[in-house]
Amino acid sequence: MIPGTNLLSLSKTAHLRILLALVFAATVATCNAPGSPPKASSHTVADLEFTSNEVSPWKQYFVLFVPDSMMYDAIDGGAVQYIDNGLVEAAEQRLWKSDSAGDSLLCRVFIMDFGTPSKAAAMFGTMVAAIPVEKTFSSFPASVAAVNDAPLVGNTTYAHFDRFYFQFDLVNYGDKTKALSDAEVFVRTMQSKVSQ
């Protein structure tokens, strides 16, 4: 405001100009500059939890939210690598569905917030370097999602989007091709959730 002027004495047109200038300034301030990375997701770990039937016909039967201070209790012996890579918060979720034979298929999902995309990517890199990555998805670069197909009755899939790192453990599969297909659906759905 110009020193010595009273905001109440300004005309409606002047008020409108000030309002438009403030809206424009706020819009410019919140936009990304060309070539800059996309804005970080405003989601929380809880926002990314799958709801029952979000990936039809999977249903939730367990969820646990874990701040980094409780990680040692939640992951027996494995918490150090997550905390050392910058873990902020995590959730473990378990989902199930029946296959055509009536057997229960299970998916254990770990959703982890590392605070920045680079820390989430580093966690992904740490995990992928430590396991035999045997498969990737044609719809995702190997630097974003990878699969350890070694478990006899399923697979473990690793992925990262924005500041989040994910692990999907699919078990009780007699058909490894179906396990890989289901893993890709989970990764694709999570990517969509993060980008919303």
Image (cartoon, rainbow, N blue to C red):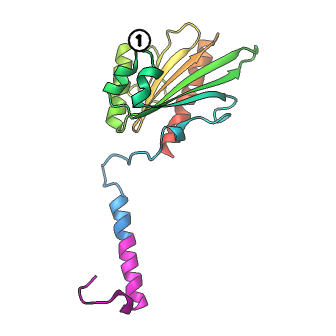
Q: Position of residue 126 (x, y in %)?
A: 34, 21
Q: Nearer the viewer, residue 82 or 170?
A: 82
Q: Which residue is mark 1?
A: 132
Q: Is residue 125 left or right of residue 149?
A: left
Main secondary-structure element of the magenta-colored stretch? helix
Residue 144 appears in the figure: no
Residue 133 appears in the figure: yes
Q: Residue at x 49, y 26 (%)?
A: 138
Q: Residues within 10 Å of mark 1 (few under 14, many from 20)?
A: few
Residue 3 drawn in magenta: yes
Q: Residue at x 43, y 27 (%)?
A: 70
Q: Position of residue 75 (x, y in %)?
A: 45, 19
Q: Position of residue 106 (x, y in %)?
A: 63, 19
Q: Amino acid at mark 1?
A: Pro
Q: Quadrant of residue 26?
A: bottom left
What segment carries the magenta color? 1-23
Q: Nearer the viewer, residue 90 or 101?
A: 90
The residue tagged with tag 1: helix, strand or loop? loop
Q: Is 119 rendered above or below residue 177?
A: below
Q: Nearer the viewer, residue 13 or 2?
A: 2
Q: Residue at x 34, y 39 (%)?
A: 116
Q: Is 10 rendered above or below residue 125?
A: below
